[in-house]
Amino acid sequence: MTDSEYANLRNREASSTPANWSGYKDIKTLGGFNSPPQTVDTGALGNLIKSLINRFRPTLVSPAPTSTEPDYSKMKITYGRVKPSTPPTIPTNKPIPSSQPQQTTEVPSFYFDYGGLRRDQQYADTGSRPNFNPSQPPTNIATPIRRHFPNEATAAALVAGTENAAYDPRRADNINPVGGIDRGIFQINSNTFNGLMQRQGELLKSYGINSFEDMYDPDKNAFVAKLIHQNSQQANPQTAGWGPWYGWQSTGYDINKGYYSHPERIKYELNKRR
């Protein structure tokens, strides 16, 4: 290449190339001519990139999740849990379900509280009938007891329970060592019954009692027991009228105002006071 041709080439390239391009070198040095890069409009390119991003944004960028959290500003605390602002549920009296059956203690319709009666526990533990505890009579026995002893029903039930522990109105007659036989729930003695028939026969007959056989009937037996109790109380006003029965005295109870007729209990009480 001649000097004139080289000069023409430089002039043609220089017309399309920025004069300050740092990579433009003398072709002699480079061993050939390298065309400089064309000037790039960065503003137009940036706008193109933004346009593409906006066009494909729905698929490139996941939308912000819509909150499913409840609006706690409209809620309040009820029974320890967060609930919507609605009137609280009023608890009912329905039983709470349980895997175990619920046990209920039913008080019998005729319940006698023997624990409320006075008792000498030492004699109850060491007497002729230690650790004796009367049971509750069945309804067919409790009913006549309450009917004839409305104000002394518990003491009367105790007397019957200590005389006839099973409350069996037809238990085998007991041969009384003092004489006669004892029968029924209050163990009415035949000799005592005969004496009542002589003195108060009309009263007994008015209640349908005509013979000692009637003492198997719980209601008639309790009626006679009430007469014996009243007669004893009238004869011994310092007592409560329970002296004619020994059973309760051998178990340590005191339902007769401190008076006893059982020889063993009398001896015990005298020794206790010395």
Image (cartoon, rainbow, N blue to C red):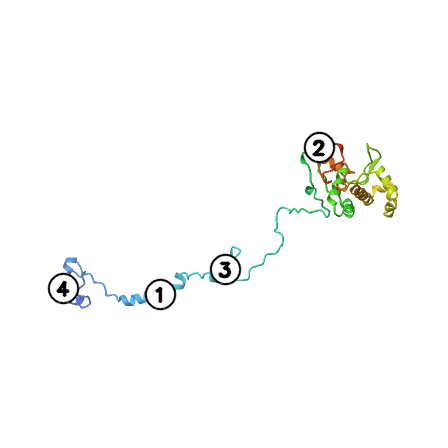
Q: Which residue is mark 3?
A: 76
| Closer to viewer: mark 4 or mark 3 | 3
Instruction: Tell me the mark number nearer the camera, choosing from 2 and 3.
Output: 2
Q: Quadrant of residue 196?
A: top right
**In the image, what residue type sits under mark 3?**
Lys
Which residue is labeled 2 in the image? Answer: 270
Residue located farthest toward the left when viewing the structure as drawn? 3
Tag 2 secondary structure: helix
Contact? badges 4 and 1 (CB < 8 Å): no
Q: Nearer the viewer, residue 134 or 152?
A: 152
How far apart marks 2 and 1 lie (CA) works out to 121 Å
Sequence-wise, which precedes: disc 2 or disc 3?
A: 3
> In x, y percent, where is residue 27?
15, 60
At label 1, the amino acid type is Leu
In the picture, measured across the screen, residue 55 lies left or right of residue 250, that is: left
Between the C-alphas of marks 4 and 3, the distance is 91 Å
The local crowd at label 3, few if under 14, some if 14 to 19, many if 20 or more residues have their Cα within 10 Å, is some
Q: Quadrant of the N terminus?
A: bottom left
> Is tag 2's residue or tag 4's residue first in the polypeptide sequence?
4
- Give how far across and how far down residue 53 sits, in percent: 36, 64
Give the number of the disc on residue 52.
1
**Dot 4, how many residues are within 10 Å of its Cα: few (below 14), some (14-19), or many (20+)?**
few
Residue 92: % across, % down: 61, 56
User: Looking at this view, is 211 or 25 the one in front?
Assistant: 211
| Mark 1: secondary structure | helix
Q: Of marks 4 and 3, which one's residue comes earlier in the chain? A: 4
Separation of disc 3 and disc 1 at Cα?
Answer: 49 Å
Q: Position of residue 162 (x, y in %)?
A: 75, 38
**What mark, if any, has residue 6 been given in the picture?**
4
